[in-house]
C-alpha cells in the first residue's frame, strides 16, 4: 500500500471505501472506490502534485465546481472533489466520478484500428452534442482525445471535462510577484491539450482559446476513427504541433475509400488552421456530420448495388463477353481459368471499385460456362499495391496470370463523371 493510497484513505474519510489503483497517466492516478452512502463504485482521480501549481488549489477546485454542474448524457459527471496531503507539506486535488465499466475509444481503436463510417459519425456527433452543451455553459474541454472518450453501451461519453483548464488555471500565479514553473505541465501537454489533437491556437499558449479549439480536436479524432491514425504524426511532440500549425489538411478519402467527399469536407473544415474558417459552433458541426451521413448513404448504396446488379445480370453471358473483349488477355491455353485484376479507377467516389471489382467479377464468373476464377485474395496479394488509378501494364498482367496458373486475365476501368459511374473492360 503506497503512501498516496494511505493519505487518500484518510482524506476520503467514511464517505468512500478505497479499494485499489486502476490506472495511472501523465495527469493523475486513478483509484476504484465504493461510495458507501449510495452503494456504488466510483473512480477517484488524484492529480499529480507538481501539476496543481503553487497557490492554485483553490482555483482548481473552483473550476471543478463549475464542471460538476454540467448534466448531459454524453458527459461523465463529477460527483465530488477535495484535497489531500501531498506528503511534502502541500496539498493536491482529487475528484470523484462514476466508474464506467468498459473501454475508452482508444481501446476500441486499438482493437479495430478503423471504425465503420456510421459508427465514427455517430460517436463524433454525440461528442459534438456534449461539447455544444458545455460550451453553452461556458466550459471548454481543451483536451479532446480518444483516451477521454469512454465507450458506454455503444455510445460516447466525454470524461475529464474542464480538467485541462483547471490545471492551466492552477498553474497561473495569483499575482505578478508569484513565481510558477509550468515545465511539468507543458511537458505532458495538459495545459494546452495533447499534441496530436491540439488546435494551432492552443500551441501558441494563448489565454483566449475558445470553443473552436475543441472542434479542431474532435475533427482530428474523427479523422483517426476513419483512417486508423491521427492526421499528423512526427518523431517529437514539437514536430507534431508544427504539422498541426502549418501542414496542408490531409484527405481521409485517400486512405479510406468508403468516406464520401461530403464527410471529408466536413472534417477538413473542422480542422482548419484558422479558427475563423471552422464551423461557428459545435451545434453546426454536429448538424454537418449528420447531414453528411444522411446525404451520402443512399448515393453510395445505389452506386454499389447498381454496379453489382449489372455485373450479376451479365454473368450468364460472361463467356461470350470474355471471348470477344480485347481486354481479356490470353496467357496460356488453359483459358477456363481466369484471373480478374484490379481495375483502374478515376473520378470521385470510385477508388474502392478498383480492387472491389476483383472479388465482384470473380464471384460472378466462377462456374459460368466452366470458368474457374482465381481466388481474389491471392490475386490482390500477388498484384501488390499500385499508384492510384494505375492497375499495371499488360506485360505485368500476363506474367502474373502465368504465375497464378490462369489461362486469361481480365483488366478494366471504373470512371466517375457527371454523377455517373462507367465500369468497362478497356
Image: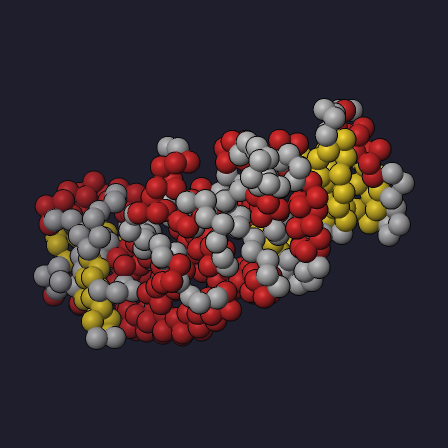
User: Residue 413 location in percent, x, y?
Assistant: 19, 62
> Looking at the image, which residue is at 32% across and 53% down?
249
Can residue 222 be seen here?
Answer: no
Picture quadrant where residue 252 is located? bottom left
In this rendered view, identify the residue nearer to me: 124 or 423. 124
Picture quadrant where residue 157 is located? bottom right
Q: Decide: is 39 above or below 56.
A: below
User: Residue 338 location in percent, x, y?
Assistant: 23, 53
> Looking at the image, which residue is at 29% across and 73% down?
310
Quadrant for the N terminus, please: top right
User: Residue 165 location in percent, x, y?
Assistant: 58, 48
> Looking at the image, which residue is at 75% across and 46% down?
81
In this rendered view, identify the residue nearer to me: 411 or 120. 120
Q: In this view, does 420 lie to the left or right of 299?
A: left
Q: Decide: is 318 above or below 57.
A: below
> Looking at the image, which residue is at 76% across and 31% down?
85
Picture quadrant where residue 264 is located? bottom left
User: Residue 146 location in percent, x, y?
Assistant: 53, 48
Instruction: Give the image's coloring scheme.
Output: secondary structure
Quadrant for the C terminus, please: bottom left
Q: In this view, does 126 lie to the left or right of 22?
A: left
Can residue 149 be seen here?
Answer: yes
In this rendered view, identify the residue nearer to me: 296 or 133. 133
In this rendered view, identify the residue nearer to me: 404 or 275. 275
Q: How many labels does the image show?
A: 0
Q: In this view, does 122 lie to the left or right of 249?
A: right
Amino acid at each position: 500500500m503506497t503512501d498516496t493510497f494511505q493519505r487518500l484513505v484518510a482524506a476520503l474519510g467514511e464517505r468512500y471505501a478505497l479499494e485499489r489503483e486502476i490506472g495511472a497517466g501523465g495527469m493523475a492516478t486513478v483509484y476504484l472506490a465504493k461510495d458507501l452512502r449510495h452503494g456504488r463504485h466510483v473512480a477517484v482521480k488524484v492529480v499529480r502534485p507538481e501539476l496543481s501549481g503553487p497557490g492554485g488549489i483553490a482555483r482548481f477546485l473552483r473550476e471543478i465546481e463549475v464542471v460538476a454542474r454540467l448534466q448531459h448524457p454524453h458527459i461523465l459527471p463529477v460527483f465530488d472533489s477535495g484535497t489531500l496531503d501531498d506528503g511534502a507539506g502541500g496539498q493536491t486535488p482529487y475528484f470523484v466520478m462514476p466508474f464506467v465499466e468498459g473501454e475508452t475509444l482508444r481501446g476500441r481503436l486499438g482493437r479495430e484500428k478503423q471504425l465503420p463510417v456510421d459508427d465514427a459519425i455517430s460517436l463524433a456527433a454525440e461528442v459534438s452534442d456534449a461539447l455544444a452543451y458545455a460550451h453553452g455553459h461556458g466550459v471548454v474541454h481543451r483536451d479532446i482525445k480518444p483516451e477521454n472518450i469512454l465507450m458506454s453501451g455503444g455510445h460516447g461519453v466525454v470524461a475529464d471535462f474542464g480538467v485541462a483548464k483547471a490545471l492551466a488555471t492552477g498553474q497561473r500565479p495569483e499575482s505578478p510577484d508569484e513565481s510558477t514553473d509550468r515545465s511539468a505541465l507543458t511537458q505532458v501537454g495538459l495545459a494546452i491539450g495533447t499534441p496530436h489533437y491540439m488546435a494551432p491556437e492552443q500551441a501558441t499558449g494563448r489565454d483566449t482559446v475558445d470553443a473552436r479549439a475543441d472542434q479542431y480536436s474532435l475533427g482530428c479524432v474523427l479523422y483517426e476513427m476513419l483512417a486508423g491514425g491521427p492526421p499528423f504524426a512526427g518523431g517529437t511532440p514539437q514536430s507534431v504541433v508544427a504539422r498541426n500549425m502549418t501542414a496542408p489538411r490531409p484527405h481521409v478519402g485517400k486512405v479510406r475509400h468508403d468516406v464520401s467527399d461530403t464527410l471529408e469536407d466536413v472534417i477538413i473544415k473542422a480542422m482548419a488552421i484558422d479558427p475563423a474558417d471552422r464551423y461557428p459552433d459545435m451545434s453546426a458541426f454536429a448538424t454537418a456530420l449528420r447531414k453528411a451521413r444522411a446525404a451520402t448513404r443512399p448515393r453510395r448504396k445505389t452506386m454499389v448495388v447498381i454496379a453489382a446488379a449489372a455485373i450479376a445480370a451479365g454473368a450468364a453471358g460472361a463467356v461470350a463477353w470474355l471471348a470477344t473483349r480485347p481486354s481479356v488477355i490470353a496467357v496460356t491455353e488453359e483459358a477456363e481459368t481466369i484471373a480478374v485484376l484490379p481495375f483502374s479507377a478515376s473520378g470521385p467516389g470510385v477508388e474502392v471499385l478498383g480492387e472491389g471489382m476483383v472479388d465482384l467479377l470473380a464471384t460472378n464468373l466462377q462456374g459460368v460456362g466452366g470458368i474457374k476464377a482465381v481466388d481474389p485474395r491471392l490475386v490482390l496479394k500477388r498484384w501488390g499495391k499500385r499508384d492510384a488509378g494505375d492497375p499495371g501494364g499488360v506485360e505485368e498482367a500476363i506474367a502474373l496470370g502465368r504465375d497464378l496458373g490462369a489461362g486469361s486475365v481480365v483488366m478494366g476501368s471504373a470512371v466517375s463523371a457527371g454523377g455517373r459511374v462507367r465500369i468497362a473492360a478497356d
